[in-house]
Amino acid sequence: MECKVAIVKIHEYLDGELPREEKGALHEHILACPDCRTRFEQLEKTDAAAFLALEGSHASVSGYDAQASQALKNRIMSSLPKGKTKKRNRFVRMIYRYPGLTAAAVFLLVMFTSMFATWQQDSKLIVAGEDLQHVVINGNTVIVPEGVSLIGNLTVENGQLEVQGTVSGDVTVIDGSMVLASTGHIAGQSRTIDQALDWFWYRVISTFNGAATTH
């Protein structure tokens, strides 16, 4: 049995999905291959740590000494042919097999949760742009007067935007509305964001673009 095949079989064994007739071959390979035996022990320790964490225990499996490791190996070797396996929690299995994907999913979940909470709470008018000296603000209404030409992008949050003049860049209105007068002109793209998911992706893209610009 090749090592790459054995690794797959080890995962199936730990998941309780390895057929009984294949356990003997896996047992022989693990006895003969130190690398696969070490991998098997690491997976068992990972399962034990995940189980303790899920059960709320503060015990640690990182402090194994040589004697404990040998005892673990003996227990594993003796249990393989018997066909009794412990099904791993599917959530734990996913974490171990796809650590990068899991970390990304957790990151997006945390970011979406925090940003969605912010999106719900924000109600203050925010105006951002590169050329705001000619912008008129009347209450929650932001006006680009007729005859005025703004350089760069313009972003308005929690308000109404009236474009009577010219904006040379992009215009973004978040949780508000936009009115483009007959005399108004937007050279770039214009968009209105009033859904949490759209707002989330806008924030993510803006964050990464800002990070790329600073570096």
Image: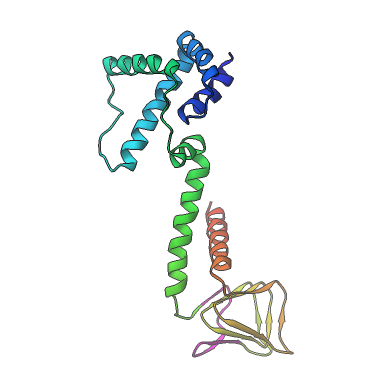
Q: Nearer the viewer, residue 138 or 133?
A: 138
Question: The N terminus lies in which quarter of the figure?
Answer: top right
- Please tell me whether residue 60 is drawn above or below residue 38 in the rendered image: below
As drawn, which residue projects farthest toward the top? 32
In this view, the residue in front, 169 or 40, is 40
Q: Residue at x 56, y 81 (%)?
A: 176
Residue at 55% x, 25% y: name it.
Answer: 8
Q: Is residue 100 above or below residue 105?
A: above
Q: Position of residue 112 (x, y in %)?
A: 48, 60
- In the rendered structure, the answer to whether residue 28 lies left or right of residue 60 reads right
Q: Which residues are magenta?
A: 127-143
Q: Is residue 37 above or below residue 164?
A: above
Quadrant location of residue 134?
Answer: bottom right
Which residue is depicted at the point 48% across and 14% down?
27
> Residue 211's spot in the image, x, y percent?
52, 55
- Asked if residue 141 is among those painted magenta in the image, a careful observer would answer yes
Residue 1 is one of the magenta-drawn residues: no
- Counting the numbered discs, the total is 0
Q: Which residue lies at the image location 48% right of the left edge and 8% below the top edge?
A: 32
Residue 209 lies, in percent from the top left, at: 57, 58
